[in-house]
Amino acid sequence: MATDPQKWKLNHSMIRVKDPKVSIKFYEHLGMKVVRKIEFPEAKFDLYFLGYDSPKAHSHGQPVSSRQGLIELTHNYGTENDPDYKVANGNSDPGRGFGHTCISVDNIQAACQRIEDAGYKFQKKLTDGRMRNIAFVLDPDGYWVEIIGQSPHDQTEEVKTTDLESYRMNHTMIRVKDKDKSLKFYQEVMGMSLIRTSVNEGAKFNLYFLAYPGEKGLPDSANGSSSTADREGILELTWNYGTENDPDFKYHNGNDEPQGFGHICVSVDDLEAACQRFEDLKVNWKKRLTDGRMNYVAFILDPDNYWVELIQNEKYKDPLVKI
């Protein structure tokens, strides 16, 4: 058995939702579509996988497990009828940890105007604050969705149209306590590459963007000037200076109460071989392949106890399989 991390993909990020109909409507307004639904009536939950699927999409025509940049919505039956149910969006205590998902768009001003015209609320509009090149819209559960432009924002100010088929599910952001431990884990254990770093000494935080090569390959440099807006399947690590020196400090992984964010998922070329590689690297397991009845998924824990799901990329098992 052998596995090559260069063939791995950051397949999806999972969040729990209260009402799937309302959530799906929102993400469809952002241009995504349901590419797969899995029902578990005996366990009383369903999973919805959404992604960009137009002919212009990076993953168009690919099996679901061979895609990057999907969002998995997990719905536990009955939450939509519970007036007191709400998720932790990851941006306030006691559930602070996960930060946001991010889509990149062709013309950011027109895209944000279209979202606002549909009645959706913003955590930050383009005109708020000093950063006029990013916005954050709130999904129906209060999760933050960052909006960034694929072109410099000053070049799209007069453009009034936006093409949803050009959108990308660019990245997922999580906060980390110790940048060195997390970067080592995601690079040496998970096999990702650092493709961009943003240092913000004045505000005392840094951002690290990691990815697998995928079909696009890796960019030439990992400095702040490297454009990554047209990519999908990026992981952003946010490190606030000094957290690594506080022995009592920890982030919320989204799976302890209060729940919200669930995990990121990596699809691999050979699931058994990849799991053996992780075993050899002495990772912390949440679930091995042999644990329980679901012998087709595994979960490992990163240094902050975020869950990382592992699944088989069916493209490498049988190119004819479309799941």
Image (cartoon, rainbow, N blue to C red):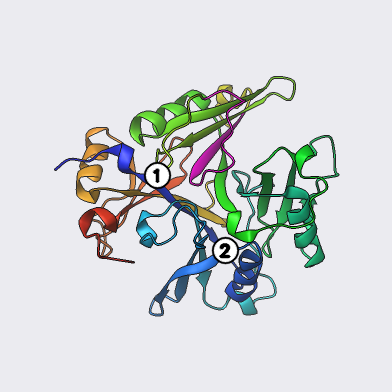
Q: Which residue is mark 2?
A: 32
Q: Earlier in the sequence, mark 1 or mark 2?
A: 2
Query: How many other residues sit within 10 Å of disc 2, few (<14), some (14-19) or many (≥20)?
Result: many
Residue 169: x and y in percent read 56, 51
Residue 282 lies in what quarter of the image?
top left
Q: Mark on residue 215?
A: 1
Label 1 crowding class (10 Å Cα cut-off): few <14, some 14-19, many 20+?
A: few
Give the left or right position of residue 141, taking residue 174 as reference.
Answer: right
In this view of the protein, which residue sits in the foreground, 52 or 181? 52
Q: Is residue 147 left or right of residue 300?
A: right
Residue visible at 77% across and 61% down? 114
Q: Quick one: 281 or 151, which is closer to the camera?
A: 151
- Could you tell me which residue is drawn at 57 percent across and 23 percent down? 223
Q: Amino acid at mark 2?
A: Met
Residue at far top of view: 201
Check disc 1 and give the amino acid type: Glu
The residue lying toward the viewer, choosing from 117 and 235, is 117
Residue 238 is covered by the magenta coloring: yes
The magenta region covers 222-239
Secondary structure at numbered mark 2 = loop
Q: Is residue 237 magenta?
A: yes
Label 1 and label 2: CA atoms lie apart by 20 Å
Residue 295 is tagged as none
Q: Position of residue 27 (x, y in %)?
A: 62, 64
Q: Residue at x 57, y 63 (%)?
A: 32
